[in-house]
Image: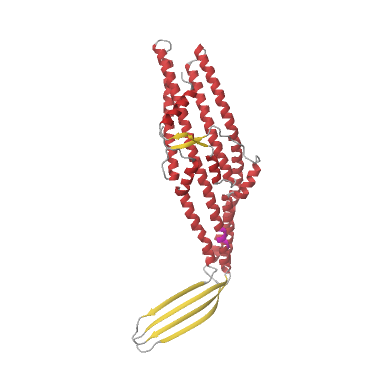
Amino acid sequence: MLSINKMFTLIALIALASTSARAETLAEIYQSAVKNDPIAGAAKATYRANKETLKQGRAVLLPQLTASSTKKEPTDTGSDQTTYTASLSQSLFNIPAWFQFQSAKKMDQVAEANFAAQQQSLIIRVSESYLNVLRAHDNKQTRKAEELAIQRQLEQVTERFEVGLLPITDVHEIQAIFDDASVNSLEANGALDIAFEQLQVLSGTSHNQLAGLKDSFTAEVPNPMSAESWVEFALTNNFELKASQLTQQAAHQTAKAAKAQHLPKISVSADYSKRSIDPSATTERDEQTAVNLKLTMPIFSGGLTSSQARQSSYQAQAAEQNYIATKRNTMQSARSNHQLAITNAARIKARKQAITSAESALKATQAGYEVGTRNIVDVLIAQRTLFQAKRNFSNARYDYILSMMRLKQVAGQLSPEDVFELNNWLLKETLINRSN
């Protein structure tokens, strides 16, 4: 009977011999996703569009220069007329425009915070998709090894049945278990292919071979250990919380601008005009220059100004409530992700010990089967328990990595450096193949 470790070694050797392509790493795929991920591309375009808000808000406060030219066709007198005008104006007192400019400055900072949050989201999406491939590959490996082990047991039981040592019911039981294992193996193959497809969605290119996680990977508890320290990090650095707070401040400035629409506005302008009349024999020119001080004040607009002021006030209240909700969710997320990271770090150790226990249980069950105190189903159950323990250990490692990344994300500390740090734990000799 082949041992479990020998089966894993055989499967790995077959996979290694089947391909000579170079394994890609997380860092390489992340760099490709930065350039090609459509969500990241849309976020960059949105960021650039929103950055124009500040320029537009400032433009209202700056001088305005206009010019025009009008030409009148010849009349019955036989002359044509051309009029040139130019006007330079400057706002002297415009409280609504000033508050809108203050709102635009806040929204400019909102654009930066949202873009930073999108960059962190890309790191999470790429890392999760990459680890999902590794997770699916590990699951496929254990499922295949489990199928082979049960197949070997089925062959032995069938041989014993044919010589009259076992009843047909034993064959049927093992056959049912083998059929279930075959289905699980088939599903694992499909899951691996789907996981590779998800990476292609991010990077825009096909991937067939990745570098796997080193066996020596170690899980460390979050530093600092205090959950409240991570809450403080999140309240200070979380980009979504920053964006929500700045949006609230911008909304209050917009509400002030709407309320100030009732106030007068003062502007000064320098106007120049020249009219040229060209009769058949002579040319007449009329030039005028004027400096005007203009005062405007709304008296009655059908209730529009008051309605817009109330609307902006309600929108400011909504933005404030959204900020409160975001702040509470950020604090809760920091605590829950901190606890999850600690739990997942402990789970890795527990899952690794479970493998050792399952291996011992399998050896004891096999020894009992050989002396007749245990039956073949007991052996298969012990084998499947061992394979499940290996899958649990694999999942625990990937869950830990993602929980640490999400903890750093909510704390506003996740950066591309975390991608490259994780990349150092990948081993190109540990090949994760798509088709094998």
Viewer can see residue 303: no
* Residue that appears at 54% across and 23% down: 358
Q: Nearer the viewer, residue 165 or 423?
A: 423
* Residue that appears at 43% across and 20% down: 152
Along the horizontal axis of the image, is 94 left or right of 166? right
159 over 204 or under it: above or below: above
Q: Residue furthest top?
A: 164
Viewer can see residue 199: yes
Give residue 52's position: percent from left, percent from top: 50, 60
Q: Is residue 104 magenta?
A: yes
* Residue that appears at 50% across and 82% down: 289
Give residue 140's position: percent from left, percent from top: 45, 31
Q: Nearer the viewer, residue 316 or 241?
A: 241
Color style of the picture: secondary structure
User: Main structural element of the magenta stretch: helix, strand or loop?
Assistant: helix
* Residue that appears at 54% across and 30% down: 393
Give residue 207's position: percent from left, percent from top: 42, 40
Give residue 84's position: percent from left, percent from top: 43, 79
Tally the numbered discs. Answer: 0
Q: Nearer the viewer, residue 427 or 196?
A: 427
Determine which quarter of the picture holds residue 355: top right
| Quadrant of the drawing holding the C terminus | top left
203 over 169 or under it: above or below: below
Q: Is residue 406 magenta?
A: no
332 over 242 or under it: above or below: above
Range of residues picked out in magenta: 102-107
214 over 233 or under it: above or below: above
